[in-house]
Amino acid sequence: MTEDTAVRRIEVDAAPTRFARGWHCLGLERDLSDGKPHQINAFGQKLVVFAGEDGAVNVLDAYCRHMGGDLSQGTVKGNEIACPFHDWRWGGDGRCKQIPYARRVPLRARTAAWPTMIQDGMVFVWNDPEGNPPPADVTIPRIPQVDSDRWTDWLWYETVIEGANCREIVDNVVDMAHFFYIHYSFPTYFKNVFEGTSAYQYMNGTGREDIRAARGGSSPVVLGTTSVAAYHGPSFMIDEVTYHYEDMDVDTILINCHYPIDSNSFVLQYGIIVEKKEGVSDDEAEQLAATTGKFIKYGFEQDVAIWKSKTKIDNPLLCEEDGPVYQLRRWYEQFYVDAAEVTPEMTDRFEFEIDTTRPNEAWRTEVEANLAARAATS
Amino acid sequence: MGTPAPRPDVRLDDGPMQSVTCTACAAQVLARKSSWDQTSVQWTEQALAACNERRQTLPPQERPNRNAFLGCSALKESIREAAVRGSLEIQDQDPLKTNPEGHQ
Ligand code: FES
Ligand SMILES: [Fe+2]
């Protein structure tokens, strides 16, 4: 057979047998430190998250080492989590501190405690299949805007995605074309940079008249967006988006993060804060955050429909106008091998800038066709 | 270990990354141009260590994603020059396939 007639076969490698090494955001501190135990299914296990009187947020394996009770069904007492079965008290360090009916606590009364970090209102947990503590240089950048009065508080969303591995969402960061077809944006500039444990996406977009008209309403018209997004580690993305309106620019910071439940489901979370611009009331800023949140939610729902029905594909066939899918996956691989097995090719700086001329021509034609079709029917 | 080795980009079958040396700092990188406006650059640790612009420290930004190195303008210019000279191929024009005589 010649190259032209041979059918290209989809290749699927074995799914990863472990979960990514790195900091994973579990949610907001304000939600998780309410003095109640929270069950979190993550990394193929059941965990309990709780904050005691000292305010520290702790993450423990949910199963009690006594007779297997589920600590996430227990009660926070003082700084400890009390098991619902026989009231054994477990501290945030994983040690059993007290058994109310026993003279003393047996030796080896220690369960798995996960390293945690509270930063900018979010709770992070460190996952490492090798069991090592987080290296000092593996960090999540600070977001000082969270504490500023000039920015709204976190608006936070959580959704469980069944039937997909979390690596599908990571592919998004390089997938320029899908932003047009799935997220109704119109990328005019697109560049990726991978270096170390971060993967950046620089994207500028213009408003889509066909979508704007369909959404209608009296909301102000977005002329375009400027976005700098980056994964810091395997699962936590910060996206700084500036919305350009006719009369002003509004800055927003979005979080897009996830943690794996198991190899075929994950929890997707996203959060938004919006700058309260001069001339924009607090109400308007909150409103904008809520509207943005709804739009993002809609976009993710469209992603999810694709993920659920698509196949895993390890040999994607790419055109020149596609982003660096292979190089992104090479970068992502660093989180799935032992720390000692991370190679320079996974972490060395790589830049990829797409020429958007041809995609933009095609998309402009499509937008015009949509507008013409709508004009014909109305 | 059990994890399959990362696969190379399928597009490199049609045109591999080629070596380019920065005229400012002599850093050696691999580059590929799909068109005049589309470039990919593979750095190494040595190249990054050699880069002048990389070493320039800018005032830290309050924004979480704005402290990253955006890229080297001297290298960008060197890559463009290499493309103009013809020592770096541009995939888009593909003169070798359509018009072998038109390309030295
Ligand atoms: S099983 Fe937890 S106290 Fe007995
Ligand atoms: Fe998407």
Image: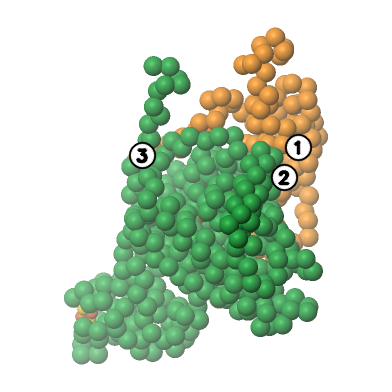
Q: Which residue is identified by label 3? A: A12
What count of labels does the image hold? 3
Q: How many residues crowd mark 2 within 10 Å: few (<14), some (14–19), many (20+)?
A: some
Q: Residue shown at 50%/75% (left/top)? A: A28
Q: Colour of chain B?
A: orange
Whether residue A112 appears in this view of the structure is: no
Q: Marks 2 and 1: in contact by CB < 8 Å?
A: yes
Q: Nearer the viewer, mark 3 or mark 2?
A: 3
Q: Amino acid at mark 1?
A: Lys
Q: Identify the image's colour scheme: rainbow, by chain, secondary structure or one colour.
A: by chain
Q: Amino acid at mark 3?
A: Val
Q: Nearer the viewer, mark 1 or mark 3?
A: 3
Q: Which mark is residue B76?
A: 1
**A66 on left or right of A275:** left
Q: Colour of chain A?
A: green
Which corner quadrant of the image does residue A98 belong to? bottom left
Residue A342 drawn at (x, y percent) = 48, 44
Label 2 residue SS: loop
Residue A369 drawn at (x, y percent) = 62, 48
Q: Does residue B95 sit above or below A26 in this rendering?
A: above
Relative to the observer, which residue lies in front, A266 or B58?
A: A266
Q: Are marks 1 and 2 on the same chain?
A: yes
Q: Which residue is identified by label 2? A: B71
Label 3 beta carbon within 8 A of ligand 2: no
Relative to the observer, which residue lies in front, B46 or B13?
A: B13
Q: Residue shown at 48%/34% (left/top)? A: A317
**What separation in Å lies between label 1 and label 2 (alpha carbons)?**
8 Å
Residue A244 drawn at (x, y percent) = 73, 63
